[in-house]
Image (spheres, rainbow, N blue to C red):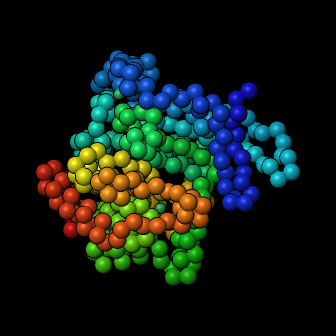
Amino acid sequence: MLKHELRWNPLLREWIIVAGHRRARPWRPEEKKRMCPFCPGAPEIGDRADWDVMVLPNKYPALRPDALEPKSRRGLFRTAAAKGFCEVVIETPEHEGDLCNLSLEHMKKVVDAYTEEYRKLGHEDFVKYVMIFRNKGKEIGVSLTHPHSQIYALPFIPPRPRRELESCRDYHLKEGRCLICDILAQETQEGERLIYENDHMIAFLPFYAMWPYEVHIVPRKHVRSLMDLKEEEKYHLADILRAVTAIYNALFDFDMPYIMVFHQEPTDGNDYGYYHMHIEFYPPYRERDKLKYAAGIEWGAGTFTYDGIPEEKARELRRAGHKAIEKGDYLGYVP
Ligand code: ZN
Ligand code: ZN
Ligand code: FE
């Protein structure tokens, strides 16, 4: 029988998604020539190449809409149905590249796909949180290199967004303002960690970054999710996503691996007016030839050590930015 359930950790108070069948997942099948499942000609894609962005269900989903309710609860060991959706957003028919290699028009279509899936999946009443993310690079452990991002529609609010939501709620109660608007104001005022900005979006290496080259993208306007963005703002989001990935790839003159995540308001029907959507990038490098690992202190304690000085790393990114942005067709600039 396929093991497929959520298990509750009563100590950390968080869910684990148990997905036994995912063992069968192919590991980098495209390395054997012409076996990329996301290239035109592959069974799920069809022969047509006249598309820009394609959304498919994940073939090896960790969550499924028809997941069975678990039978029972044994003492402290509680389970729940692994009910949800896992999707893949294939960003281009081209087998190689990063977000910065897509045209602005093309990247805007990717943003539109994210928005539409967030709306559609969030509309299901068992979906409490829609997590959009992108894993890039062998160092991150991606199993497929064809440019794609993923969406998990979860039946619970996961711990990191939950903590952010609680902090924003508490701050709003106390100060009557948005915590993230205020962080953005202070980052803008201090200025030394800013990386890129356009009319509607700002990218910076946060004062409290955990990863050496961590970058956050925050809309200037207080918006809770992609659904609150106007067309023009979505173009500027597309622009800044292209810019940040171009800056990363210019930093060491190699394709920078990273994890990209969208933090948006939950879709459980409650009011999260105090929350402010943003996007976070965590690249695993701390220097050109050194990876940063989450190890004993990070995993065991949950406390990160930052190898370096955030303001210096931000300066390096800006320097790379001047190089990368001048060459391209971008809407914004490196401050
Ligand atoms: Zn491919
Ligand atoms: Zn705000
Ligand atoms: Fe966040």
**Residue 73 appears in view:** yes
Establish if 159 lies above or below 46.
below
What is the quadrant of residue 135 in the picture?
top left
Q: Is residue 264 left or right of residue 251?
A: right
**Residue 215 appears in view:** no
Residue at coordinates 32% horizontally, 33% vertically from top-left?
A: 92
User: In x, y percent, where is residue 90?
Assistant: 39, 34
User: In x, y percent, where is residue 224?
Assistant: 47, 61
Query: Which one is nearer the viewer's eye here, 328 or 179?
Result: 328
Residue at coordinates 39% horizontally, 66% vertically from top-left?
A: 307
Q: Quadrant of the C terminus?
A: bottom left
Total labels: the figure holds 0
User: In x, y percent, where is residue 263?
Assistant: 48, 57
User: In x, y percent, where is residue 108?
Assistant: 31, 45
Query: Which one is nearer the viewer's eye here, 42 or 223?
Result: 42
Query: Which one is nearer the viewer's eye here, 320 or 217?
Result: 320
Q: Quadrant of the N terminus?
A: top right
Residue at coordinates 47% horizontally, 74% vertically from top-left?
A: 179
Establish if 59 lies above or below 214.
above
Q: Is residue 290 left or right of residue 304?
A: left
